[in-house]
Amino acid sequence: MENKEFGQIKISEDVISIIASLATSEVEGVAQMIGSITGNIGEILGKKNFSKGVKVQVLDGKADIDAYVYIEYGSIIPDTAKKIQENIKTTVETMTGLEVKTVNVYIQGITTKQEKPPEAK
């Protein structure tokens, strides 16, 4: 990040992951984010994993973001994926001031409202 009058401001990739995950979950048609084994164990132990289903890499002040999601049956996948990309980009750039270079959306499956998606292995 930039040097400011009083010092530097650095935003952790974990914070960006949380912002991107919450932005993804706001999109209509997203059933669930897919977490990692580590995140799932943390949830079992009572810790909420708000960065679930998102990978972030920041290089030279630009972020590359990957989102792994389950989509609700009946949603138009390309439209939902585009809305996810737009919402992540807008939200992360607005909240952090970082440039979002890429947002990759990986559709891991489709669920109905009655069933819950399986957890990531």
Image: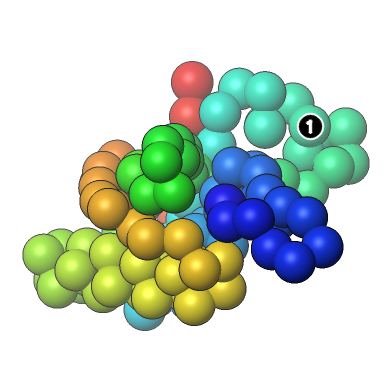
Residue drawn at x 67%, y 23% is 38
Q: Position of residue 17 (x, y in %)?
A: 56, 49
- Establish if 34 lies above or below 98: above
- Establish if 8 lies above or below 43: below
Residue drawn at x 37%, y 61% is 99
Residue drawn at x 67%, y 32% is 39
Residue drawn at x 54%, y 37% is 35
In the picture as drawn, the residue positioned furthest to the front comes out as: 5
The answer to which image quadrant residue 68 occupies is: top left
Residue 110 falls left or right of residue 21: left
Q: Position of residue 91 (x, y in %)?
A: 47, 74
User: 113 or 27, which lies in front?
Assistant: 27
Which amino acid lies under the numbered mark 1 shown in the image of this protein?
Gly
Please tell me whether mark 1 sits on a helix, a strand or a loop. Answer: helix
- Establish if 91 lies above or below 118: below
User: 36 or 100, which lies in front?
Assistant: 100
Residue 22 falls left or right of residue 117: right
Disc 1 target residue: 42
Residue 8 falls left or right of residue 90: right
- Establish if 31 lies above or below 83: above
